[in-house]
Image: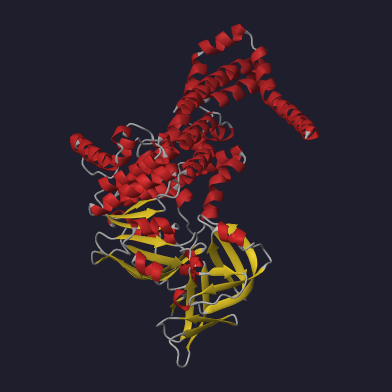
């Protein structure tokens, strides 16, 4: 449906470099990235608000990169300040309607308002609406325009948790009803809960486009791994060990045994904090990896305690407060960490 | 902390005093003028058809100039607020020229383009319009010196309208013309109205440029000057008081309307 083919542009401090992706009809495509990577600029270039320097944008096979904004048939909704402040909610929703017939306008506005659940707010001025209502009106207006592709720029970021959740439900519903959505956010949870396809943006580039499962299980870069919350991430080199099914991963003079089918050479390693155990002396057992290190930080996590241990590089272990007390762990104490070779995820 | 507040209140006191002196500087001469005018002479001025005609002439010519030139000023203000173009800063400078040059010189400049030998003068004659010694010339002279007020206010008004709203309107399928009339203009309206009021006020009180283009028919400022030079202060003050009163009533009313809107 929408093909972004190798587009590049520079606008002020922001830059997009050779961005490629494809969105099919009915997709819910979330562009995920930290602030300032050019996510909004990318949306604006698709909508035509910002001109691209090179590349092409195609909508239903038609090149739209040179089309005027009003001819592209793409709606954009921002996180705030996009309703016309001098018009009522009714007038805002009716704005894109071409019809001159009052009855027809009324019907269409009512239908759009009903769909997003703001039928009782039609006579209000935008400044009197709550954050969630405001976004619903903006969505109703986009629906009234008849466009079936919506670009949403951080639409949930200014909302309270309840409104956020309600609006997520609405966005899923609109998507099920046939609206193709491209949604940019910096919130990984938001992406996972809405998207059937995620694009990761880093420094003006689209570095990975895949399903949420693929992005989570096989992050393509250190940035992605860190961004989606994987704490223990090491870049290094993988080498096979003669007469062993294990491979040796070397990073910062540390050698970690790993059970993996990844190819030898440059690679990165992920270990979930809950896979790392801490002991006061070296453990004997099936774990192949044992390192002595010093505790550099102890912090309360959402569940349990995160203990950071410096073994030449810092690794984080997630333990219970019970374990913290019984092992008498404190910052500066020397401890052993242990984890199995099979718990190391290696990606080339 | 106490010292901070003490210092702050002392500062406020000094500033209030300085501001008060300035306000007095504006109010005192006007108050003096009102107080020195007897009711009888005021009645006489109000009753004079000559005075009433001159005030009316000032009001309508200034309004006509403001309305006519707003068709050119508002689009230019929009371009200046929204577009980047070559020599934009020079255009902005040109717009302010009428404010900085002596108004008698402005009158001479306007006279130069409306004489019978000029293109505008000849073109006007073809349609039976005379400029010199005529309301049409007064309108041009008033507009020349007062147009920067409208352009600058409208430009600031358009610049304050978030460009994003205009772009969103375009994504909703509206044409640029529709966006201008339904989004940009209504949202900049308060500033444009301020510019209107300022241009009208500045135009109707213009003396230097108007007297060079048209000594007759006499606008109120020209009549005040003429009475002062011919008959002295005593005869010019009542006309001045009537004109200032009319101006004040109009502008206070317009400001109230603007505030309400």
Quarter occupied by residue A312: bottom right
Residue A222, horizontal then vertical, whole percent: 49, 72
Screen quadrant of the N terminus of chain A: bottom left
User: At x 35% / y 49%, what residue is drawn?
Assistant: A168
Eyeballing the image, is B174 above or below B253? below
Residue B67 rendering spot, x and y as whole percentages: 42, 34
Q: Would you identify the image quadrant in which residue B90 lies?
A: bottom right
On the rendered image, what quadrant is the C terminus of chain A found in?
bottom left
- Tell me which residue sits at (42%, 41%) in the image: A131
- Name the residue at the top extreme: B40
Foreground residue among A118 and A66: A118
Q: Residue at x 46, y 64 (%)?
A: A228
B123 relative to B38 in the view: left or right: left
Extreme residue in the bottom direction: A242
Q: Is residue B129 left or right of residue A272?
A: left
Task: Compare residues A138 and B158 and report the one nearer the observer.
Answer: A138
Asked if B199 appears above or below B236 in the picture, the reply is below
The location of residue A334, given as percent across then percent down, is 66, 70
Which of A79 and B221 lies nearest the eye of the viewer? A79
Position of A186 compared to A124: left or right? Answer: right
Extreme right residue here? B3
Res A347 seen here: yes
Q: Position of residue B33 (x, y in %)?
A: 66, 17
Q: On the rendered structure, is B167 left or right of A276?
A: left
Q: Is residue B134 visible?
A: no
The way the protein has been coloured in the rendering is: secondary structure
């Amino acid at each position: 449906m929408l093909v972004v083919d190798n587009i590049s542009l520079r606008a002020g401090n922001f830059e997009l470099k050779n961005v490629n992706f494809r969105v099919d009809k009915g997709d819910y495509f979330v562009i995920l990235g930290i602030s300032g990577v050019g996510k909004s600029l990318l949306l604006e270039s698709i909508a035509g608000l910002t001109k691209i320097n090179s590349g092409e944008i195609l909508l239903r096979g038609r090149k739209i990169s040179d089309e005027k904004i009003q001819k592209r048939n793409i709606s954009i909704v921002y996180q705030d300040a996009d309703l016309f402040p001098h018009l009522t909610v009714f007038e805002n929703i009716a704005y894109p309607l071409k019809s001159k017939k009052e009855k027809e306008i009324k019907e269409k506005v009512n239908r759009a308002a009903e769909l997003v659940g703001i039928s009782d707010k039609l006579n209000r001025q935008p400044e009197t609406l709550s954050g969630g209502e405001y976004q619903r009106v903006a969505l109703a207006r986009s629906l009234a325009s008849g466009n079936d592709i919506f670009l949403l720029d951080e639409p949930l970021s200014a909302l309270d948790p309840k409104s956020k959740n309600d609006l997520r439900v609405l966005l899923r519903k609109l998507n099920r009803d046939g609206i193709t959505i491209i949604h940019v956010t910096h919130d990984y949870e938001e992406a996972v809960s809405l998207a059937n396809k995620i694009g990761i943006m880093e420094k003006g580039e689209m570095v990975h486009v895949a399903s949420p499962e693929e992005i989570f299980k096989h992050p393509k870069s250190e940035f992605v791994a860190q961004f989606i919350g994987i704490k223990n991430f090491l870049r290094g080199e993988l080498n096979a060990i003669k007469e062993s099914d294990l491979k040796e991963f070397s990073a910062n003079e540390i050698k970690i045994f790993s059970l993996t089918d990844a190819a030898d050479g440059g690679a990165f390693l992920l270990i979930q904090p809950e896979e790392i155990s801490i002991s006061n002396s070296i453990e004997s057992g099936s774990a192949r990896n044992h390192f002595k290190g010093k505790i550099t930080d102890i912090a309360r996590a959402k569940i349990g305690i995160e203990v950071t241990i410096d073994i030449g590089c810092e690794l984080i272990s997630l333990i219970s407060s019970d374990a913290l007390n019984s092992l008498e762990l404190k910052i500066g104490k020397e401890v052993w960490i242990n984890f199995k070779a099979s718990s190391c995820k290696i990606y080339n | 902390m106490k010292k901070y507040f003490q210092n702050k209140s002392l500062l406020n006191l000094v500033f209030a005093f300085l501001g008060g002196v300035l306000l007095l500087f504006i109010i005192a001469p006007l108050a003096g003028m009102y107080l020195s005018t007897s009711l009888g002479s005021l009645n006489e001025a109000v009753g004079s058809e000559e005075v009433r005609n001159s005030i009316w002439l000032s009001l309508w010519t200034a309004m006509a100039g403001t309305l006519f030139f707003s068709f050119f000023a508002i689009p230019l203000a929009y371009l200046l607020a929204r577009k980047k173009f070559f020599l934009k800063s020079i255009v902005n400078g040109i717009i302010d020229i009428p404010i900085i040059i002596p108004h008698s010189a402005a009158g001479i400049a306007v006279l130069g383009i409306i004489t019978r030998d000029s293109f505008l003068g000849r073109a006007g004659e073809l349609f039976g319009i005379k400029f010199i010694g005529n309301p049409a010339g007064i309108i041009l002279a008033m507009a020349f010196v007062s147009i920067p007020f409208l352009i600058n206010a409208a430009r600031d008004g358009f610049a304050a309208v978030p460009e994003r709203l205009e772009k969103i309107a375009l994504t909703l399928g509206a044409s640029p013309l529709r966006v201008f009339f339904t989004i940009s203009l209504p949202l900049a309206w308060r500033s444009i109205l301020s510019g209107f009021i300022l241009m009208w006020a500045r135009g109707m009180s213009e003396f230097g440029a108007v007297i060079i283009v048209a000594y007759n028919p006499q606008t109120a400022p020209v009549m005040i000057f003429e009475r002062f030079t011919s008959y002295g202060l005593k005869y010019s003050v009542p006309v001045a008081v009537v004109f200032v009163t009319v101006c004040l009533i109009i502008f206070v009313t317009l400001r109230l309307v603007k505030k309400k809107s």
